[in-house]
Image: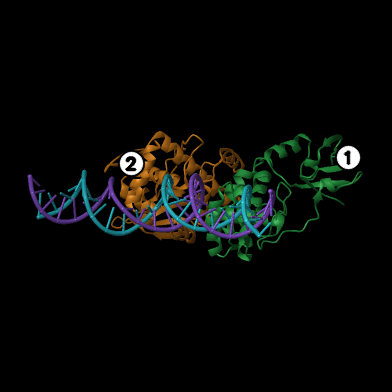
Chain colours: A green, B orange, C cyan, D purple
DNA sequence: TTTATTTTTTAGCCTAGCCTAAAAATTTAA
DNA sequence: TTAAATTTTTAGGCTAGGCTAAAAAATAAA
């Protein structure tokens, strides 16, 4: 139904829209797709004809209901495959993205249905991101950024905002992964840095880090 | 390194060459690829430049060592994924081909290494076809066509020559699958048909069927 | 509010992989 | 061994998805 390129554009627009909810600009899309704005214009016009998004010249694009369905289906597949790679094939969570990027385009509803069951109907991928159900609905979570916690508060790491290999490897070095309990020992006002407790160790982390990590408080 | 289309051509030429060992004709390739001969000429010339095959105008194509490596790698991936689909996701052996046809193009050596291990390093796919190892070597089997067996001989079904859904479903109806023990009760000279024993039942099968089923004798 | 800057679109071109129609080479038949 | 039939290649076109360069629209600054 949709080509790989089309699916990737739709997915990118979905993610961009999730952040700002308004129409997504041509340049923003070009940025994340690593293409030129002129190429984006072409593709966006084609996708508008296919009814997966609404497009107004010079204004930007926003997904239709149909487009959202395509996007969540691709995201669902991506995240389920990531669970497979980590849980079944023992990949590390910072190695799976590129492979899942390929696997997310495999077309077979039956395959995904069975894969989901095989994995025990997981709700979250190895990075802590929610896996939408077959209808495209995400489980609501009340996760917040680590940077929002006050001194003395505790939280459980449930995800990352950024998932570059560099960042994930940094977290590894600090022994932080999904499920890790974190306690805020101290917080600096002027630069937003924190001292946190992870297991038996304590670490100093910058504001940048604290704003890239999601935790769930209880 | 190679596009999906290129990999599919290489794979097709490999299979054609396995049957006749000589140079493969343009028309033969067009046939299995379901394209026009002119398209094949284009692609074959491109693949010759890429050194995966030797091509002589009007004579045909034959894979180089490099081409054989590409082909066996794709075949290895295809068959390993089929094992995954049947063993882990409980697909039926006649449902997995189209999905494996997509999965065989996923690029990641590490993925295949781990998948192979996860599946217990299988030697055969669900249709009984051998899975080449990482170096492209096939395990030798002395399978023969059922039609070659004489009256009274026994064999174990180890594969099929043809794997259309229709044929596989026919085998199902007769309760024949990989590992099924078959005994030849009788054989007609004039049309090559047979009466065979499968489990507690006996069946009449035509020459066409007997020539589409591989068995291993002991 | 006019000018300068930035963003977006248009126009035209490129490659991969397909196609059709016509030409050329090979094979088969007379 | 020449003519007919078949196979294969060439030539020229098409679509998807990119690109650059230039034009047009929108936004920001003077």
Label 2: which residue?
B61
Q: Position of residue A217 (x, y in %)?
A: 85, 50
- The front one of A32 and A145 is A32
Q: Is residue B212 visible?
A: no
Task: Kindly identify which chain the residue marked by label 2 belongs to.
Answer: B
Q: Position of residue B57 (x, y in %)?
A: 28, 41
Q: Position of residue B202 (x, y in %)?
A: 45, 59
How many residues crowd around disc 2 within 10 Å: few (fewer than 14), some, or many (20 or more)?
many
As displayed, is residue B156 above or below residue A17?
above
- The front one of A20 and A115 is A20
Residue positioned most to the right: A152
Q: Position of residue A213 (x, y in %)?
A: 78, 45
**Disc 2 from disc 1: Cα separation:** 70 Å
User: Is B213 on the left or on the right of A88, as rendered?
Assistant: left
Callout 2: SS: strand
**Do callouts 2 and 1 point to residues on the same chain?**
no
User: Is A109 on the left or on the right of B24, as rendered?
Assistant: right
- The front one of A55 and A17 is A55
In contact (CB < 8 Å): disc 2 and disc 1: no
Indicate which disc residue B187 carries. none
How many residues crowd around disc 1 within 10 Å: few (fewer than 14), some, or many (20 or more)?
few
Can you say which quadrant of the picture contains the C terminus of chain B? top left
User: Is B133 on the left or on the right of B41, as rendered?
Assistant: right
Residue at 69%, 55% in the rendered image: A131
Residue at 59%, 51% in the rendered image: A104
Label 1: which residue?
A188
- The front one of A85 and A33 is A33
Callout 1: SS: loop
Task: Kindly identify which chain the residue marked by label 1 belongs to.
Answer: A
Q: Is residue A135 visible?
A: yes
Number of the front mark, 2 or 1: 1
User: Is A131 on the left or on the right of B102, as rendered?
Assistant: right
């Amino acid at each position: 139904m949709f080509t790989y390129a089309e699916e990737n554009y739709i997915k990118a627009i979905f993610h961009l829209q999730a952040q700002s909810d308004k129409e997504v600009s041509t340049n923003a899309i070009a940025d994340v797709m690593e293409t030129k704005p002129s190429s984006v214009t072409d593709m966006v016009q084609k996708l508008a004809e296919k009814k997966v998004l609404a497009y107004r010249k010079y204004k930007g694009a926003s997904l239709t209901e149909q487009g959202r369905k395509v996007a969540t289906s691709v995201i669902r597949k991506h995240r389920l495959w990531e669970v497979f790679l980590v849980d079944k094939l023992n990949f590390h969570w910072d190695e799976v993205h590129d492979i899942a990027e390929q696997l997310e385009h495999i077309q077979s509803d039956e395959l995904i249905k069975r894969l989901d069951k095989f994995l025990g109907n997981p709700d979250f991928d190895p990075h802590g991101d929610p896996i939408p159900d077959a209808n495209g609905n995400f489980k609501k979570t009340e996760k917040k950024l680590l940077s929002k916690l006050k001194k003395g508060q505790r939280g459980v790491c449930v995800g990352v905002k950024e998932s570059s290999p560099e960042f994930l490897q940094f977290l590894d070095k600090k022994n932080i992964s999904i499920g890790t309990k974190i306690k805020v020992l101290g917080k600096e006002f002027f630069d937003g840095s924190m001292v946190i407790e992870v297991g038996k160790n304590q670490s100093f982390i910058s504001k940048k880090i604290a704003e890239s990590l999601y935790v769930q408080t209880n």
